[in-house]
Image (cartoon, helix red, strand yellow):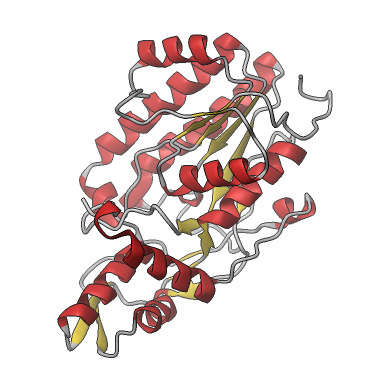
Amino acid sequence: MRVGDGIGPLDRGAPVFVAGHRGLAGSAIHRALETAGFTSLVTRTSAELDLTDRAAVFAFFRRARPASVVLAAAKVGGILANSTFPVDFLSENLRIQTNVMDAAIEVGVERLLFLGSSCIYPKFAEQPIREDSLLTGHLEPTNDAYAIAKIAGILHVQAVRRQYGLPWISAMPTNLYGPNDNFSAQGSHVLPALIRRYDEARGRGDAAVVNWGSGRPRREFLHSDDLASAVLHLLDHYDGDSHVNVGTGRDATIREIAEMVADAVGYEGETRWDTEKPDGTPRKLLDVGLLRSTGWSPRIGLRAGIERTVAWYRESGAELRVA
């Protein structure tokens, strides 16, 4: 298969490697592929395969010979983690991406989807953010190292298309949430952090919950099952040089989102805002026109998605990622 030859639905019987299948995005993608009838899904845990180990990654690809790859593995975290450990986020993600893509080239992987993040865009990009806003301004300083790694991944995919003629693509999701998210105090993103904070406050009977920042920034959120649906849709239908934004096209303030979380967990106390803490990017809403033009749209509303996630959080108990 070569760029320009036209693409069709992936062969449901051919081996597909889902890198990062236990994470928030990867687990949802794995579930979606199973539901869609894929019978040869290949996975490895981080204990079984260290994707930062170049020799191990190449040896794995030579044995497994996947026809397609979904690269959802990454070191991820919230504002605090990204601000504290920028070297880790830059170095580990660059190594993961480069090793997987180089090994995929060596064994002739026909179709690869690289999963990035909406943090690739400039802090003050025009809203909603189009794909062509990439590299047009300064990044948000609190996660610029992670963003640079993801930008490198996009350019790597585009370079493969030019040099090898392979129909590889990149998808850039907005803020994700859902089952298998990270609910740790130090490493979580805003929505799982809010769910844990409000649920624990309800359990303790706290009179107030204190959140970082002013609550005024606006954020767009996408349930991980909707992301997975979009990823499969793109693999079956999209072959273009541009990376593709994946989102809902709608946003809400952090205050509004906090209210939804409080309602979902049954917390009835007061919410306070610590304005000494950073807000991060003031707004981040993706233009999803390109994705919608391919025939895909999301199905899970934010309030319903938060309620589902709270239920999963409570049911998961000791299996949660909280460290």
The structure residue drawn at horizontal position 41% and vertical position 62%, both measured from the top left corner, is 281
- Residue 50 horizontal/vertical position (percent): 33, 24
Q: Residue at x 53, y 57 (%)?
A: 125
> As drawn, is 258 to the left or to the right of 80?
right
Q: Is residue 236 above or below residue 182?
A: above
Evaluate whether residue 136 shows in this view.
Answer: no
Q: Residue furthest right?
A: 5
Left or right for 53, reference 294: left
Would you place residue 55 above or below residue 44 in this image?
above
Of residues 115 and 154, the one nearer the viewer is 115
Q: Is residue 253 above or below residue 163?
A: below
* 52, 60: nearer the viewer: 60
Residue at left offset 35%, top offset 64%: 315
Q: How many marks?
A: 0
Please tell me which residue lies in front, 3 or 136: 3
Q: Is residue 200 above or below residue 180?
A: below
Residue 184 seen by the camera? yes
> On the picture, is 7 further left or further right than 245?
right
Residue 111 appears at what percent x and percent y? Answer: 66, 26
| Residue depicted at x 38% and y 65% | 191
Q: Residue 173: give x, y in percent of width and height.
A: 54, 51
Q: Is residue 237 toward the left or the right of residue 172 in the image?
A: right
- Residue sitting nearer the eye, 249 or 277: 249
Residue 106, percent from left and from top = 56, 9
Quadrant of the image for the N terminus?
top right
